[in-house]
Amino acid sequence: MGPRAALRLLLRLTLCGAAIAIAPVASADGATPRRVVAVKIDGASEDARPLEATIRELLARLQLNVTTPDKVPPASLLESVTIDLTGTYGARVVVRSANGTTVLDRTVPRGDSPAIQREQIAHAVRGAAEAELLIDDDRVAGRAPPVIEPLPAFEPRPASATEDAMRVEAPPANADTPPTPLLPRPARARVARALALDVSTFAGGGLFAPDASVVARVGGAAALWLRKDGVRPGVSVLALYAFPFETGDDVVSARTNVLSLRVLPSVALVHNARFSLEVEAGGGLDVVSVDPTSAELPSSALGAATTRASGVFSGAVTGRLGLASDVALTLTAMLDVDPTSRRWVFDDRGLSRDVLAPWTARPMLLAGLSFTAMGPAR
């Protein structure tokens, strides 16, 4: 055989070996590998979508496809996964094999970060899938599952006379004594884990007196919330400052500024990761400072500046649009009601004129930014 013929023979043998190496291996009974995982997630869509994406990413590394239970051919199903996100304390993850055997039943606790919980759930699903892949590879290859031999029975050696003398007999069990129940998690600990502190700043404007234009306001608030399933209660403390504004006429006018403090018990009627709607009702104080001025009258005729504090009832509705798990845009419509009906009057030789007469009902609109400073996110 010449060198050229030998080279052609060597090339043919190499190609045949490569074809054999890359050809799929079929089992003796023609079984095909199972490479589909059915995933069902119960819960809000804004929580389910990122979790499903995380599971898809991890299972794709194992060359597994993820779909819904109603779209899986039975012959391709490796395992089915059910995740319940509606639990109070965490997400329950149940994984069943193709024959219905439960291989994982675990509750992943709800922590401060939803992203960490998603990673924990996805890694639990991936771990169960890796175990099922090993079993399925044995099935496809026609290998029998490993048989675990039982351990030999333990035969205690006879006790010596010294050991018999030293043995202490346990007291007989009382069959009438009920088993000790498992203690539930203390309610105080559950409440502490659900408490959250939100801090916000806002600006806007509102009406204060008939002859004043829209009064600009700025302020901040701190709100303590009990973030749990269902209706969420809370309480907010607000501080508002109204920029100085002028009222009166050409003869006498008043330069006024207002500092407002409010305590508002709150209830979040609608809440999810993207939007929440809160209703608040409470009260507080308005500290009003009035400084009279005039271009025609001497200062001795006007009197000194005065500061008065009056009680105010308040109600508000706040909408929050989530930008992230702990940051939100806020829009608040508030109504203050002042039952005192106090007025500031200038008396000029028996002729009285109102310098400042605040509205009894004073609406305002505030927009701001809120973030969670402590505790679980929205």
Image (tube, helix red, strand yellow):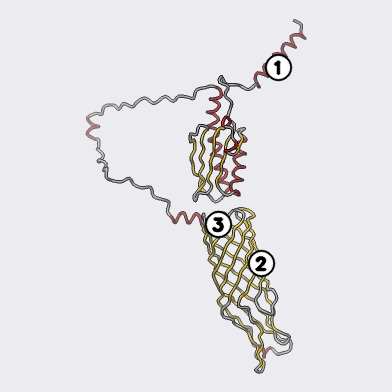
x and y, in percent, of residue 358 in the image: 63, 79
Helix, strand or loop at disc 3?
strand
Left or right: residue 272 compared with residue 169:
right
Which residue is at a point 25% across and 32% down the rendered structure image?
163
Tag in front: 1 or 3: 1
**Disc assigned to residue 313:** none
Tell me the amino acid under the disc marked 3: Met
**Can you name the residue that lies furthest to the bottom here?**
349
Against 144, residue 174 (above or below) is below
Q: Residues within 10 Å of mark 3 (few under 14, many from 20)?
A: some
Left or right: residue 168 compared with residue 111:
left
Q: Residues within 10 Å of mark 1 (few under 14, many from 20)?
A: few
Closer to the chain start, of discs 2 and 3, is 2
**Can you name the residue that lies furthest to the front here?**
70
| Disc 1 target residue | 15
x and y, in percent, of residue 41 in the image: 56, 44
**Quarter where residue 205 is shown:** bottom right
Which residue is at a point 57% across and 62% down the rendered structure image?
278
Q: Cβ–Cβ below 8 Å for labels 1 and 2?
A: no
Tell me the amino acid under the disc marked 1: Leu
The quadrant in which the C terminus is found is: bottom right
